Amino acid sequence: MKALTRHRRLAAIWSSRPGWRGWLSTVNHNDVGLMFLVTAFFYFLVGGILAMLIRAQLATPHSAFAGPEVYSQFFTMHGTIMMFLFAIPAIEGLAIYLLPKMLGTRDLAYPRLTAYGFWCYFFGGAMLLVALLFGIAPDGGWFMYPPLTGKIHSPGINTDFWLIGITFVEISAISAAVELTVSILKYRAPGMSLGRMPIFAWYILVTALMILTGFPPLILGSILLELERAFGLPFFQLELGGDSLLWQHLFWLFGHPEVYIIFLPAAGVISTILPVMASTTLLGYRWVVAAAVALAILSFGLWVHHMFTTGIPHMGLAFFSAASTLVAIPTAVQVFAWIGTMWKGTPRLHLPMLHILGFFATFVIGGLTGVMVAVVPFDWQVHDTAFVTAHLHYVLFGGFVFPILAAVYYWLPLVSGRKRYFRLGEVAFALIFTGFHATFLAMHWVGLMGQRRRISTYAPEDGWTAINLISSVGGFVLAFGLAMVLVEVVLHAVVRHHSARNPWRAGTLEWATTMPAPAYNFASLPHVDSREPLWDDPGLPVRLARGEGYLGDPASGRRETLMVDVATGVPEQHVVYPTNTHLPIVLAAVTGLFFLSILIKVFWLTPVAVAGVVALGWLWVWRLGSRNDLGEQPIGRDLRVPNIAESDRPPGWWGSAFLLVADGTLFGSLLFGYAFLWTVAPGWPPPAFANPSPFALVAASAGAALGIAGGVFSIRNNRDGKGPVPGLLMALGGMLGLGVALMVFLAGAPSPSSHAYGATLWVLGSYGLLHAVLAGLMLAFLLSRHRAGYISSRRRAELAIAPVWIGYACVTTALILLAAYLPGLAT
Amino acid sequence: MSVTTGIVLSGCAGPLSPLEPGGPAARSIATLWWVMLTASVAIFALVMVLVALAWRAAAKPAAQNGSEQVWIMGLGLAFPVAVLLSLLAYGLWLGERLLPRDGADAASVQAEARRWSWAFSYDDAPGRITEDVLHIPAGRPVDVAITTVDVIHSFWVPRLAGKLDAIPGHVNVLRIEADVPGTYAGLSSEFSGPGYDRHAFTVVAHGPDDWQAFLEGGE
């Protein structure tokens, strides 16, 4: 078969439907990655316009441009949009678009989940945009501290838009994190061991694991605050045993890792581009990986440095101050590894390199001011002043926007197959760089003169007029530079100016595709022997196009790829992907209906939406699998491996494991909140404890034993040819036992609206019940699948997934009952 | 150096500037700032020079090119560890000194925040409440017990000390001290809604006689 024929056949298999309608049903990472990026940059524009409005307001004293009410919406939405609707989705989009190409494979682990995540982001973002357009946007500051954001002081719908809209959007972050983690670990080119992975993949792996453990505290906090606002469960109300400090802990448990979740992918971009710009390899690859991991771990020990002024004992602060300064060490390792790389090679001043230099100048200053504010006494002075605003912009603009602009210019040829024709980028860079530093250097200064964050105006006597004017002029210069980048990208899309393949002479696999990259990425999958396969073998792209790699035969008409061993990259399983479908957008819309019903308080709609989600979820998994045994599949190069349906560890098992990491973190945060209220909140202990119910304890123990044993039996009996049904029924009985135990527990707990204690128990019990029901649904699904002929002693993969969820439900139920009953027993 | 510092200093002056300290706490923090600024400028310059030298092939000592020992162990690990540990020790020592410890001859006052005003009361003058003006003796430490009746606020007198939050249900104690009698501007520095801009107060530090007069009922 000729390369062109192969291309046509593969393109027919992998392409989305033609025209804009294709976007609604595409599940291909090439499409969805770009959809993420375009939407994210749209929000960058919206957030940027808000920034301009803020700078217009502050340009002169006694400004009458916007009143405090409107101005509060400006700055709240500026921060919210930049963090949640620009930075995180841009990272997701970049990783979704690039990773399969860099890893030498054809798509991510769960194509439909990629699309579902995008549509959750799209609809959730639209909610916030609508709020902004109608002037009912959130106005309590992007970190939303109660009691200001509680029902008493913020009775309007503004706050609910934030809590509900952001939680909806976070579904996309969690989806992408699960997807990227599993893809990096299991979906790589054969031969690509962990040590041969492109450095970008390491950074995204670390980032994805951080999202799984960093976002759940925020999601929990948002749920608790919305439960308080909508149903009066008093988690943050002093009078009823709540404590507003709980929100700050939950928010910053998320909020600080968030900064590194944004920075690490950008550092991955630099570690990828900078060596190419210097025609050399990255200095200290292993050290850089270790530094990224260290940064991730340390970043979870820093959250209290946002709370130095809340009255925490000084020795407690000392610990967090130490962690906050020490985080500079892995950062320094990376910065000096990059500079060492430049010394090792021959740096060239291409446009992406200019932005990397912009990064160095800006981020180093941001890092140094970061160390300053990590020193407790200094933070007492500058906390909540413009100094901190300036610092965080140095870190985020320096550490994220400059690298992402470098990434745009570096990978644009791959997306379009073109090179730049008009040379606007260099002028744009100069404007961005000078504009940025004028704006934010000045802002440090005015902060040290006492200007607080978030004030809507000031008096001429304060002496800040000239500095604020400089800052505003700088801001508009910066905006003009960014607008020029936008113009250049649009021109790039319009003007045909063909680029040769691999224009930067890079060594990583994304440049082995044809340009622009086709939907299937590689006509056949490479075998990888080093970190820079293209440098070792410049003829690789041609040989891949000729079908000399793995899976080079498109005869099956299916979307195929391989799963490999985590450490070594040895091919293990043959994967057939689902194709174009509207299921993701429909499921996202129904999920949105659930959030909308709570937002506008039409509660009869809530159970309808939940039922819709369950039905669509059922359909979602039903569409996979096969009714016939497949046997070992030929994957080319004389190798045969089993299909994922005939394995013990299918993709769904891996996805469940990592989703449960996030779920477990949410549960852990809930237990943390319970312990925090117990020890710190002034209104504790509560007036009465829950009475331990012996019946609940017996039912839970019996349910757990049945559930776990049933799960094990179903797998074992099926393997021995006796069928899984008895085991599945047994496990279903077990989940029923858990459910009854939790309902008895909830019935015996104090009223959830009377005290934070009762409210916490209610959330704990509901959480357990939800998981028992979920595991029960999975078992019911497996029973139907078995009846319909999808499960055989060979096709056993689906049976492996339910026991993971059964085990989780049993462990959490045990912890819930212990946490709820032990204090009552003890007194 | 002194000329530059003088210019920058005067540039940072103002009634709300932590860099124009009027008391011991603010003064030691201002010193901390100047120390950190100097070190930061030096470190920044070093990094920029190293970046620039990457373009000058001749300037690169061959032995150091691509050496993990120099770049990662030396500059990446040893250098920041040394700088940060000394800074941490300095910050910790300073923070300990600023705490409200027993033993000092400190006056005690209470600050209660609400949207958008402050009410101050005095241990030495029971029943006396002043709105938006806090009276303190000059030259003597004052422990301010801070709380709020509604949302979170923060008590900040930039020229005297750092800030401390007013959190519902909690009382935080901040030690402030003014060297000399005078008026010092105070701010509430945690966003609290539409009246946040004007949520401010004044601290009046009295000499010994005036302070006695204030406690006895005069102004």
Image: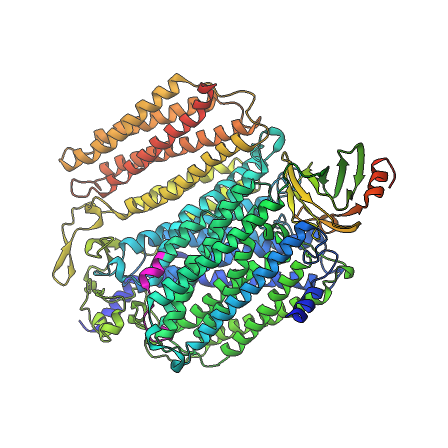
Farthest residue, direction top = A694
**Residue A284 counted in the magenta span:** yes
Residue at coordinates 38% horizontally, 23% vertically from top-left?
A: A740
Q: How is the image coloured?
A: rainbow
Q: Position of residue A555 (x, y in %)?
A: 19, 62
Q: Is residue A178 left or right of residue B89?
A: left
Residue A497, quarter of the rendered image: bottom left
Q: Position of residue A58 (x, y in %)?
A: 69, 61
Seen from the viewer's position, the closer of residues A149 and A715 is: A149
Q: Is residue B59 above or below residue B213?
A: below
Q: Is residue B218 left or right of residue A185?
A: right
Seen from the viewer's position, the closer of residues A635 and A615 is: A635
**Residue A555 counted in the magenta span:** no
Q: Position of residue A617 (x, y in %)?
A: 36, 43
Residue A31, quarter of the rendered image: bottom left
The answer to whether residue A378 is visible is yes
The answer to whether residue A584 is visible is no
Residue at coordinates 42% horizontally, 65% vertically from top-left?
A: A335
Residue A493, quarter of the rendered image: bottom left
Q: Is residue A332 above or below residue B46?
A: above
Report the magenta residues as a range. A276-290
Q: Position of residue A204 (x, y in %)?
A: 37, 57
Assign the N terminus of chain A to one quadrant of the image: bottom left
Seen from the viewer's position, the closer of residues A267 and B210 is: B210
Seen from the viewer's position, the closer of residues A69 and B144 is: B144
